[in-house]
C-alpha cells in the first residue's frame, strides 16, 4: 500500500515508522544493512528519511518548520486595486537642531515641552493635514548618536526624508549619519534649514557643507529641494509641506486600503493602565478594531486604536500611525505586523518565532568546540563584567541603551545585560539583580513601592535616568573603573658595585657608587650583569652612607646596599633603581 509520507526537517525513527505504517524494527534493520546503527528514538535528517520512505515504496512530501511563515505577508497588490496614499516622512538630523520644534509648529501642539531637556527620547509618529485636506505622516526620530538603530528604522519605513539642519550650526556628525540612512533606504531627501531667523544663520554655509556629502541642491543643478524655515517664528512651514507633497506626487505613492492590514511597529511600551501598547504605521490595507494581529513573537486581538492626538478610532488606513492595544507583550520595534485569520494561526506563528529566538539565544554546551573556541573561552575568563538590569519606558530606548553599552565593551571589560525590558521596575527585577550583584538602571520609569522597599532591604541600587547620554556617560565611568590600571615605570638612577663585603649575621653587602641619577630607599631595584637583568628585586630596604641610614644617595657618591635573601652579588654588577606608578585607564 503506497502512502504519502510527510517528512519535516528532522524526524525520529519511531515517528517515521508510524507514518509509513511499518514496524520500527524493520526501519532499524534496513539502516543496519546500510551500515548505520540507530535506536528507535534517534533523530534522522530529512534526506535520510526520504531515502528510507522511497525504499519502502512510499511517496514523500517534504515540509519545513519555517513553512508556517508562508502567507504571513501577502504578495503585492494589483495596480488597479490601489489608490493614492499620504507620504510617510522621516524627520532626521543632529541633536538640538529643532526637529521636534519643527513638527510642533506643523501640528500646532507642544510635543517638545513634554520631552526631558527638550530632547526626543523615542520615535513619535504624527499626521498633519494641510488646509487643502492633503495628509502627511511624520516620523520624528531622535537625534542623539545612541539612537542610530531607531533612526535607521525610521528611514526604512519612510518614503521621504526631511533633513533638518540648523542654519547657525551647519552639518554635524548625526546629520551625516542621517544622510547615510536616507541613501541606504533609497529615499529622496528634502533639506529644511531651520533657525533661519537667528542673526548668525547662514543658509549658504549649509549648502556648501552638504556638497561635501554628495547632497546637491536644486540651485546648484542637483535634485535635492532645500527650504528655509524657522520653527519658532513659523516661517516657511507651508513651503516645506508643499515641497513634501510635490515630491510625493512625483513618487506616485499608492496602496490598497480594501484588504487585511499590514504594517510595521515603530515603537512599543508597557503602559501601567493599558498594558502592552505598540505604535504601528499601517503600510497597506485597513486595520480595524477586533482584528487578530501578529507582530514578531507578540499577538493579540485589537482592543482599541488610538491616533496621534489621543483619540480612539475604529480603523486606520494606509500611512496612518496608530497605537494598538491588545497585544500579549510589547513587540520589538521594526517588526512587521499583519492581520491573520484566526487565533490558532496567530499562536502557531508566534510559538515558532519564539522557539527560533530561544534556539538562537541558547549557548551550545558540551563537546564539539574547536580549539580556537576553547582558547577564546579561556581568554574571556579574564574579562571584567559589569552586570546590569535595564528597564525603559519603551522598547526603542531600551534597545538603544543595550546596543550603546555593547559598543563600549572591550577585550578587558564589558557590560553584561542580565535582563532588559519595558515597564516599571518590579520585585522580580530586584530579586534578579540581588542574585547577580547588579544595579538596576531605570530609564524614564520608576520602581513600584514594593520593589523599592525590597531593594532597600536587600541593598540593591536603583539608578534613575531621563536623558540617555547621562546614563551612557555614568556607566562608561563605572566600566572604566573595572579596567586594570597601567603600570608606568620611572627611572631614578644606576649604581655600580665596587666591592662586596661579607658581614656576619647580615650577609653580603654591596659597596656601590651612584653613576647616574639618584638611588632612593623604598624604590624598586633590579640587578644587571653584562647588560642582562639577572634579578628583579622588591623594594630597597637598606641604604647606608658610612654607618648612617639615609633616604637617598645622589650621583657620584658612595653607599652600601643589602638585598636581603639575594646573596649572588658580584663586583661590576649594576643596580638599577626605579619607581612604578599606577595610572588609571578610561574607555
Image (cartoon, rainbow, N blue to C red):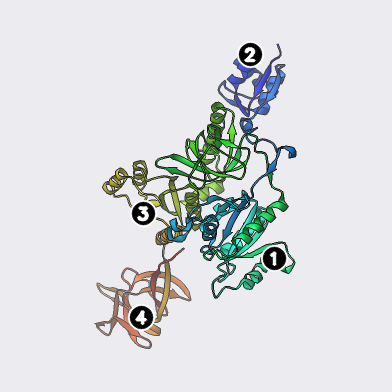
Indicate which disc, 4 or 2, sits on the residue closer to the N terminus: 2
Q: Secondary structure at mark 3?
A: strand
* Disc sitting over residue 217 in the figure: 1
Distance of label 3 from label 4 (alpha carbons): 50 Å
Residue 552, quarter of picture = bottom left
Of badges 1 and 3, nearer the viewer stands 1
Res. 21 mark:
2
Q: Can you tell which quarter of the image residue 464 is in?
A: bottom left
Report if the CB atoms under discs 1 and 4 are less than 8 Å apart: no
At label 1, counting other C-alpha atoms closer than 10 Å, the crowd grade (few under 14, some 14-19, many 20 or more) is: some
Give x and y (percent) for residue 320. Answer: 58, 44
Task: Measure how far apart labels 1 and 4 are at the Cα level.
Answer: 70 Å
- Of 581 and 498, which appears nearest the observer? 581
Residue hosting label 3: 463
Q: How busy is the neighbourhood of tag 2: few (under 14 within 10 Å), some, or many (20 plus)?
A: few
Mark 1 or 2 closer to N-term? Answer: 2
Q: Earlier in the sequence, mark 2 or mark 3?
A: 2
Please indicate whether residue 242 sits to the left or right of residue 346 in the image: right
Of tags 3 and 4, the one toward the viewer is: 3
Residue indicated by mark 4:
519
Amino acid at each position: 500500500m503506497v502512502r504519502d509520507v510527510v517528512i519535516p526537517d528532522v524526524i525520529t525513527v519511531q515517528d517515521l515508522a508510524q507514518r509509513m505504517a511499518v514496524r520500527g524494527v524493520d526501519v532499524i534493520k534496513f539502516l543496519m544493512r546500510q551500515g548505520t546503527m540507530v535506536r528507535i528514538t534517534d533523530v534522522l535528517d530529512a534526506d535520510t528519511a526520504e531515502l528510507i520512505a522511497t525504499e519502502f515504496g512510499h511517496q514523500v512530501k517534504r515540509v519545513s518548520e519555517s513553512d508556517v511563515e508562508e502567507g504571513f505577508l501577502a504578495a503585492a497588490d494589483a495596480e488597479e486595486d490601489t489608490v493614492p496614499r499620504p507620504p510617510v516622512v522621516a524627520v532626521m538630523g543632529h541633536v538640538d537642531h529643532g526637529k521636534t520644534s519643527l513638527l510642533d509648529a506643523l501640528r500646532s501642539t507642544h510635543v517638545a515641552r513634554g520631552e526631558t531637556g527638550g530632547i526626543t527620547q523615542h520615535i513619535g509618529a504624527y499626521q498633519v493635514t494641510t488646509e487643502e485636506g492633503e495628509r502627511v505622516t511624520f516620523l520624528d526620530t531622535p537625534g542623539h548618536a545612541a539612537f542610530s538603530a531607531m533612526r535607521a528604522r525610521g528611514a526604512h519605513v519612510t518614503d521621504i526624508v526631511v533633513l533638518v539642519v540648523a542654519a547657525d550650526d551647519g552639518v554635524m556628525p548625526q546629520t551625516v549619519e542621517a544622510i547615510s540612512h536616507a541613501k541606504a533606504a533609497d529615499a529622496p531627501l528634502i533639506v529644511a534649514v531651520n533657525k533661519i531667523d537667528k542673526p548668525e544663520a547662514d543658509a549658504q554655509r549649509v549648502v556648501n557643507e552638504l556638497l561635501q556629502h554628495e547632497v546637491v541642491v536644486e540651485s546648484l543643478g542637483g535634485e535635492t529641494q532645500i527650504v528655509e524655515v524657522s520653527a519658532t517664528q513659523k516661517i516657511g512651514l507651508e513651503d516645506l509641506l508643499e515641497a513634501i507633497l510635490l515630491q510625493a506626487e512625483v513618487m506616485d505613492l499608492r496602496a490598497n486600503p480594501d484588504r487585511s492590514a499590514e504594517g510595521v511597529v515603530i515603537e512599543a511600551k508597557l503602559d501601567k493602565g493599558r498594558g502592552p501598547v505598540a505604535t504601528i504605521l499601517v503600510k497597506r490595507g485597513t486595520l480595524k478594531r477586533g482584528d487578530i494581529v501578529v507582530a514578531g513573537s507578540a499577538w493579540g486581538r485589537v482592543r482599541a486604536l488610538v491616533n496621534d492626538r489621543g483619540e480612539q478610532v475604529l480603523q486606520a488606513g494606509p500611512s496612518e500611525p496608530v497605537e494598538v492595544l491588545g497585544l500579549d507583550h510589547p513587540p520589538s520595534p521594526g517588526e512587521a505586523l499583519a492581520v491573520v485569520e484566526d487565533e490558532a494561526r496567530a499562536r502557531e506563528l508566534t510559538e515558532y518565532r519564539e522557539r527560533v529566538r530561544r534556539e538562537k539565544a541558547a549557548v551550545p554546551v558540551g563537546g564539539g568546540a574547536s580549539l580556537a573556541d576553547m582558547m577564546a573561552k579561556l581568554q574571556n575568563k579574564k574579562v571584567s563584567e559589569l552586570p546590569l538590569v535595564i528597564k525603559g519606558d519603551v522598547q526603542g530606548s531600551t534597545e538603544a541603551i543595550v546596543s550603546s553599552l555593547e559598543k563600549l565593551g572591550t577585550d578587558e571589560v564589558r557590560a553584561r545585560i542580565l535582563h532588559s525590558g519595558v515597564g516599571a521596575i518590579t520585585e522580580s527585577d530586584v530579586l534578579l539583580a540581588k542574585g547577580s550583584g547588579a544595579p538596576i538602571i531605570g530609564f524614564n520609569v520608576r520602581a513600584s513601592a514594593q520593589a523599592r522597599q525590597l531593594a532597600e532591604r536587600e541593598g540593591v541600587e536603583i539608578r534613575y535616568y531621563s536623558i540617555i547620554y547621562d546614563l551612557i556617560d555614568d556607566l562608561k565611568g563605572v566600566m572604566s573603573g573595572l579596567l586594570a590600571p597601567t603600570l608606568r615605570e620611572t627611572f631614578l638612577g644606576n649604581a655600580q658595585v665596587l666591592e662586596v663585603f661579607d658581614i656576619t649575621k647580615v650577609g653580603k653587602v654591596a659597596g656601590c657608587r651612584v653613576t647616574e641619577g639618584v638611588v632612593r630607599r623604598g624604590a624598586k631595584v633590579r640587578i644587571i650583569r653584562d647588560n642582562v637583568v639577572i634579578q628583579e628585586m622588591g623594594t630597597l630596604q637598606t641604604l647606608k652612607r658610612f654607618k648612617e641610614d639615609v633616604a637617598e644617595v645622589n650621583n657620584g657618591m658612595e653607599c652600601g646596599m643589602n638585598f636581603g635573601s639575594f646573596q649572588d652579588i658580584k663586583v661590576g654588577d649594576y643596580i638599577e633603581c626605579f619607581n612604578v606608578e599606577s595610572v588609571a585607564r578610561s574607555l
